[in-house]
Each structure stands twice: as C-alpha cells, then as structure tokens.
C-alpha cells in the first residue's frame, strides 16, 4: 500500500511541473536554422531547443520529433530522421 501511495505521489508531482512531452512524426516542410524553427507537413511549427542539432535536416526529410510545451510554445527536444 505504501509503495502504491509513493508511486501515485510521484506521478502527481510530475504533472504539477506543468511540462508534458509528446511525439510527432511527419515530413519537414521547412527548416529555419537561424530562427531555430521547423515546420512539419501537417502545419505544426516547433521551436527547436538549444543543444538540439538541426544540422543536415532538409525539407522533405521524414522525422520523428519529441517536444514539450514551454511558455505556450511547442519546443522540440529531439529531432531524428526516420
């Protein structure tokens, strides 16, 4: 019982932080290295977090993107070619 309570408490603390993560897959419609943004073929625009490499990414590349919401923006924490 105690273990379950601790687990539930840890989950609630995780949600209280306000950050959530999600994944998307799609084709890159555009890549703006200067602005550090990418746009997927479904129209989703994501800012790319500092430290995440977008070198070599080109329009038309199929990608898998992990992202989270930060200050109301979708911020990519990982961008990987498929």
Image (cartoon, helix red, strand yellow):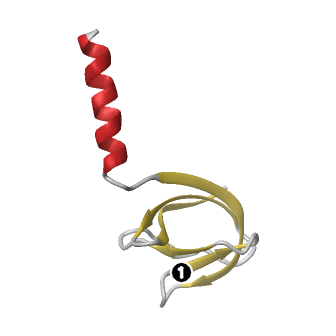
Residue at 66% across / 77% down in the picture? 58
Residue at 34% across / 27% down in the picture? 8
- Report crowding for label 1: few under 14, some 14 to 19, many 20 or more residues within 10 A (C-alpha): some
Residue at 36% across / 70% down in the picture? 51
Within the image, what quadrant is residue 4 found in? top left
> How many numbered dots are placed on residues in this image?
1
- Residue 68, horizontal then vertical, whole percent: 46, 60
Look at the image and tell me in which quarter the N terminus lies: top left
Furthest residue toward top: 1
Look at the image and tell me in which quarter the C terminus lies: bottom right
- Residue 50, horizontal then vertical, whole percent: 36, 73
- Residue 49, horizontal then vertical, whole percent: 41, 71
| 59 relative to 82, above or below | below
| 37 relative to 44, above or below | below
Q: Secondary structure at mark 1?
A: strand
| 17 relative to 63, above or below | above
């Amino acid at each position: 019982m105690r273990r379950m309570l601790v687990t539930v408490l840890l989950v609630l603390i995780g949600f209280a932080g306000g950050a959530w993560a999600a994944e998307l897959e799609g084709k890159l419609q555009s890549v703006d290295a200067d602005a550090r943004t990418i746009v997927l073929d479904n129209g989703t625009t994501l800012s790319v977090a500092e430290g995440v490499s977008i070198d070599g990414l080109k329009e038309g590349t199929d990608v898998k993107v992990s992202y989270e919401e930060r200050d109301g923006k979708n911020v990519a924490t990982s961008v990987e070619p498929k």
